[in-house]
Image: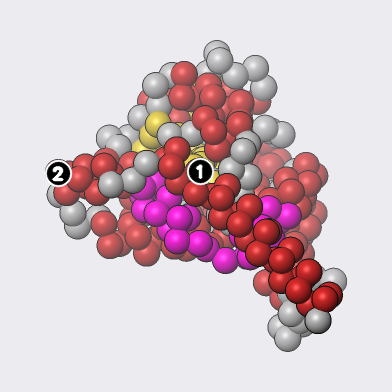
Amino acid sequence: MTKHEVPKDHPRYQSLFIRESIIEGMHKRIVAEAGLIAHGRGEAFDYLLGEETPQFALEQERLATIHLLLAKKPVISVNGNVAVLCPEEIVELSKGLNAPLEINLFYRSRERELAIETAMKEAGAKKLLGIDPDKQTTIKEISHQRRIVDIDGIAVSDCVFVPLEDGDRTQALTHLKKEVITVDLNPLSRTSLTASVSITNNLTRASAEMVVIAKELKHLSRDELLIERSKHNNSKLLETALFYMSNRLTRLATELSIKKNE
């Protein structure tokens, strides 16, 4: 089955469509095989959210957008899953935040770099950093392939948006005094706990919602953005995410128990 063959009246149409998109992306060498596992793990946590965006996640997205708007040199990191799941939204967000896109990969190969570049340009991107060998440098704090960064991108950025989980890189970038914005459905992951701002939501929803938020906030002055930022606390929002998941499971378990006893 291809993504276009998923029946639109299927009760899990959206989930199946995204799954087939990820599989198709793997066959095109955009997504690494491990990307399928990562997607499945995230999907499991999305069930705990009810596969919708809670209010606390909207607050996280708002806080993240504020940080990116306040940054002097924001950068949006792109990997294979991002290029398949929400390329158009990420391109639009890049334009709205004036934040360049940089390809940064754990399973790095020239073939994948070019495949992702093609996918992102088909989605409207004009230029992508991270693939010109003459403009690459390394982050010493990272031992794997993600250490390779662009000298005009992540290397000199003050705020990096990492749309999907990556604990090692998040830790390394924060040690370099860079702000790191992440999207990770697991609020207890090293990524979520280390990031400057953690978004506990599905990337496909979060990216689209952040596009809208960016349009709303981009007209605010720097002082107004600073005031807005002071209204939110990342640690408190992560705590809320955990309570939300826990309380939802408790409620569902109670409802199930009541039905059995009826």
Spot occupied by residue 148 in the image (x, y as percentages of width and height): 57, 25
Residue that carries the numbered disc 2 in the rendered image:
223
Spot occupied by residue 224 in the image (x, y as percentages of width and height): 17, 49
Q: Is residue 142 left or right of residue 101?
A: right
Q: Is mark 1 on a helix, strand or loop?
A: helix
Where does the magenta region start and end?
A: 43-65
> Which of marks 2 and 1 precedes in the sequence?
2
Q: Is mark 2 on a helix, strand or loop?
A: helix
Q: Is residue 148 left or right of residue 159?
A: right
As drawn, which residue projects farthest toward the front? 261
Residue positioned 46% across, 24% down in the render = 174
Spot occupied by residue 38 in the image (x, y as percentages of width and height): 73, 45
Find residue 223 and report its image quarter. Answer: top left
Find residue 254 and report its image quarter. Answer: bottom right
Rendered-image quadrant of the C terminus:
bottom right
Residue positioned 28% across, 47% down in the render = 231
258 over 80 or under it: above or below:
below
State the separation of the CA atoms marked 1 and 2. 28 Å
Residue 91 in view, yes or no: no
Q: What's under tag 2, amino acid-wise? A: Asp
Q: Nearer the viewer, residue 120 or 173?
A: 173
178 over 67 or under it: above or below:
above
Give the main secondary structure, helix, strand or loop, of the magenta stretch: helix
Residue that carries the numbered disc 1 in the rendered image:
239
Rendered-image quadrant of the N terminus:
bottom right
Crowd tier of the residue under label 1, counting other residues whose Cα lies within 10 Å: few below 14, some 14–19, many 20 or above: few
Q: What's under tag 1, amino acid-wise? A: Glu
Q: Are marks 1 and 2 in contact (CB under 8 Å)?
A: no
Q: Which of 128 and 248 is in front in this view?
A: 248
